[in-house]
Structures are given as C-alpha cells and as structure tokens.
Image (cartoon, rainbow, N blue to C red):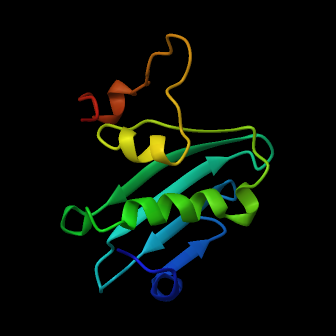
Amino acid sequence: MVHQRSARKVVRQHSSCHHRCARCARCSLNPLESAFGRAVTDLATYAYWTDVVVAEVYRRRGIGRWLSETMLAHPQLQGLRRVSLLTRDAAPLYAQLGFRQGAGSLKYMEYRDERSGSEKPAA
C-alpha cells in the first residue's frame, strides 16, 4: 500500500508534459519508473486519461488507486464536467473511484498514416 506521506516524496506532478494541455503524474519508487498517468484536457470541461500505467512488478500494491486519486484531486482538474478513459483490465478499480461505463454505442476508432510505416494497430 502506498502511504500519502511517502508518496509526496516520490511523485512529481508536471504542469505540462510537452504540451500545455496535458497534466502528468509520475510515481518512482526506485530509479525506474513504477507508475505514470497523463490527462489531456481543455482545462475547462473535459479530460481524457491516457497512458495510465503501473509497472507489472508494482501492481496489487495500491499504486494504481493512489495514482488515480492523485490525478482526480489535481487542482487544475477540478470542476470538469467529465473525465473519460479506456481500460483493458482496470475497470473494477475505476468503478470504485466513481467511473461508470459510458452510455450509447461509442466505438473506438483511430487513424493511421500508412506512409508513416505504422500500419499495425496498437495492441
């Protein structure tokens, strides 16, 4: 379990990660990155969480929950109407934090420039 007192020492919240509309949080429990989360937002009504990951060896220790709570509490992400994300395997965790399955029949879509050499869809 990650304790708030020790977590303050290991998390670096960045006001921008290569772009002024992204908010990032990192958790480093050793020289290697153990967790990372990024919210892409308009800073007014909406944020999309992307790249929220916990390294395999650090899972089941409460780090994902703590990272998610930290992101939800970020001062610049308060008052948004909606925060959304896609998850492969962490739906139960996000449900505990108040996330709900989206309404409707939205479909995930992506555009890939065939000339860039990345023809294979992301896994």
Q: Position of residue 103 (x, y in %)?
A: 56, 17
Q: Is residue 18 visible?
A: no
Relative vertical location of residue 32 with respect to residue 37 in this rendering, above or below:
below
Q: Position of residue 64 (x, y in %)?
A: 39, 60
The answer to whether 115 appears left or right of 45 in the picture is left
The front one of 37 and 101 is 101
Quadrant in the picture for the C terminus = top left
Relative vertical location of residue 7 with respect to residue 117 in this rendering, above or below:
below
Quadrant in the picture for the N terminus = bottom left
Q: To which quarter of the image does residue 107 belong?
A: top left
The front one of 19 and 12 is 12
Q: To which quarter of the image does residue 55 belong?
A: bottom left
- x 51%, y 80%: residue: 4
The front one of 22 and 47 is 47
- x 40%, y 27%: residue: 113
Q: To which quarter of the image does residue 99 belong?
A: top right
Relative vertical location of residue 32 with respect to residue 74 in this rendering, above or below:
below
- x 43%, y 59%: residue: 65
Q: Position of residue 61 (x, y in %)?
A: 29, 68
Q: Position of residue 5 (x, y in %)?
A: 51, 87
The answer to whether 89 appears left or right of 94 in the picture is left
